[in-house]
Amino acid sequence: MTTLAIIPARYASTRFPGKPLALLCGKPVIQWVWERVSAVGAVNEAVVATDDRRILEAVESIGGRAMMTSDQHRSGTDRCGEVLKALEAEGRRYDVVVNVQGDEPFVEACQLETLLENFASPETEIASLMTPIKDWEELQSPNNVKVVCNLRHEALYFSRQPIPHLRGADLKEWPARQTYYKHVGIYAFRAEVLKRVVALPLSALEGSESLEQLRWLDNGYRIRMSVTDHTNIGIDTPEDLALAERKLKIEN
């Protein structure tokens, strides 16, 4: 199985402009992500997909590969689709494409390996990760996307609201009475599936929750979910960067 990892990295973030180039313990955030992803044995090739030449040059300066993409994409997945199309035009072929956001400097090799294990089954179209939610604050935050699955470990629905609803129990008791899962936004796609999903129009559910994976479910695609015990710190704000810096200093 030939695996391509694409790392979308957009410069013009509303909450933190230029965050891929923000320094984290002396290295740009995008460098942390690229180094971690490219070191995974199950990944045959890693490419950063960006809309800004400064990010491209930063990646190339450390020996990485980056490609320029349109600044009109709605999501990182759409950016991945453009890169896959360009690489296939060069004559390259891949079985699976992994999408790791460029603001995830703590992505773990074991997470990507767990994700890719799903593709041992020919039935797997899309795979992603989830981690148990441990407290009410984490459960009720709309910034934490929740997911419920069927008995085949396929996603039934994603929501910014706590799901499932635990009838007859006090809200703050829910995490102790029911196992809830938070979505970890790392995806892997069969290459042919990725090309199809990026061509789909916006769906009603996606528009309601502002979650692109609902578009895929709306159109009948199956998302197989694996559990990870690792919780990543995504860099969405300067405060997240400060938290990540403290975490790295403790680890090292």
Image (spheres, rainbow, N blue to C red):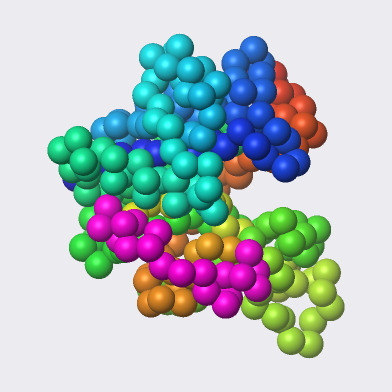
- Camera-nearest residue between 74 and 44: 74
19 w.r.t. 250: above or below: below
- Camera-nearest residue between 236 and 153: 236
Secondary structure mostly seen in magenta is helix
85 w.r.t. 34: above or below: below
Residue 77 image point, x, y percent: 45, 51
Residue 214 image point, x, y percent: 52, 70
- Residue bounds of the magenta highlight: 191-210
Picture quarter with the C terminus: top right
Q: Is residue 113 magenta?
A: no
For image coordinates 49% across by 34% down, the residue present is: 50
For image coordinates 72% across by 67% down, the residue present is: 175
Image side of residue 16 versus residue 211, left or right = right
Residue 203 image point, x, y percent: 52, 74
Image side of residue 170 versus residue 185, left or right = right
Q: Is residue 107 visible?
A: no
Residue 15 image point, x, y percent: 75, 41
For image coordinates 31% across by 44% down, the residue present is: 84
Image side of residue 250 versus residue 28, left or right = right
Res 174 quadrant in image: bottom right
Image side of residue 98 versus residue 190, left or right = right
86 w.r.t. 187: above or below: above
Picture quarter with the N terminus: top left
